[in-house]
């Protein structure tokens, strides 16, 4: 197996000199002033938590009335969703 002449390839290649750009050594502090997206994310997770708690409460009530399990869970999910939507509708109506 023949040895390659690596030095010859390095001599043939011409390197281009790129100008060095002077970048500042620091970055200016820009405070995040957007509170609305954080509040909207918080309300989103609050809605999920409320939906879960309401589903558990409604399913407990329906199962204590000795309803069929499938019907009790379906009714609990439906009523939880309806309660959340009713709350959102009333809160939007009050804010206007």
Image (cartoon, helix red, strand yellow):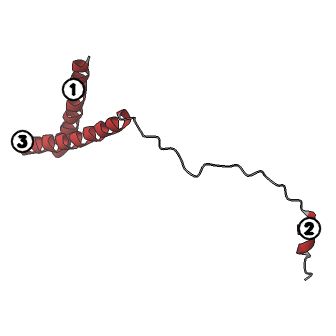
| Alpha carbon distance from label 3 to label 2 | 90 Å
Position of residue 48 relative to residue 83, above or below, is below
**In this rendering, would 32 be left or right of 54?**
right
Badge 3 local density, few (<14 within 10 Å), some, or many (20+)? Answer: few
Seen from the viewer's position, the closer of residues 48 and 56 is 48
Q: Which SS class for mark 1?
A: helix
Give the mark, 3 or 2, whose residue is nearer the N terminus.
2
Q: Quadrant of the N terminus?
A: bottom right
Position of residue 18 relative to residue 10, above or below, is above
Look at 73% across and 52% down and name the residue there.
Answer: 20
Look at 23% across and 32% down and name the residue there.
Answer: 84
- Please say if the residues under marks 1 and 3 sit with CB atoms less than 8 Å apart: no
Query: Residue 28, how many percent across, how many down?
Result: 51, 44
Q: Which numbered mark, 3 or 2, is in the foreground of this view?
A: 2
Badge 2 local density, few (<14 within 10 Å), some, or many (20+)? Answer: few
**In this rendering, would 7 be left or right of 21?**
right
Seen from the viewer's position, the closer of residues 32 and 43 is 32
* Residue lying at the far left of the rendered structure: 65
Q: Which SS class for mark 3?
A: loop
Give the mark, 1 or 3, whose residue is nearer the N terminus.
3
Residue identified by numbered label 3: 65
Query: Residue 87, how many percent across, how many down?
Result: 21, 28
**Tag on residue 11?**
2
| Alpha carbon distance from label 1 to label 2 | 78 Å
Seen from the viewer's position, the closer of residues 2 and 10 is 10
Residue 9 visible in the shown view: yes
| Alpha carbon distance from label 1 to label 3 | 25 Å
**In which quadrant of the rendered view does residue 48 lie?**
top left
Residue identified by numbered label 1: 86
Give the mark, 1 or 2, whose residue is nearer the N terminus.
2
């Amino acid at each position: 197996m023949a040895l390659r002449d690596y030095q010859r390839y390095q001599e043939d290649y011409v390197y281009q000199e790129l100008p060095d750009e002077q970048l500042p050594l620091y970055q200016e502090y820009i405070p995040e002033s957007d509170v609305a997206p954080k509040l909207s994310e918080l309300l989103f997770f609050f809605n999920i938590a409320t939906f879960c708690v309401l589903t558990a409460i409604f399913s407990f009530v329906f199962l204590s009335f000795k309803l069929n399990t499938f019907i009790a869970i379906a009714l609990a999910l439906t009523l939880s969703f309806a309660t959340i939507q009713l709350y959102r509708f009333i809160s939007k109506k009050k804010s206007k």
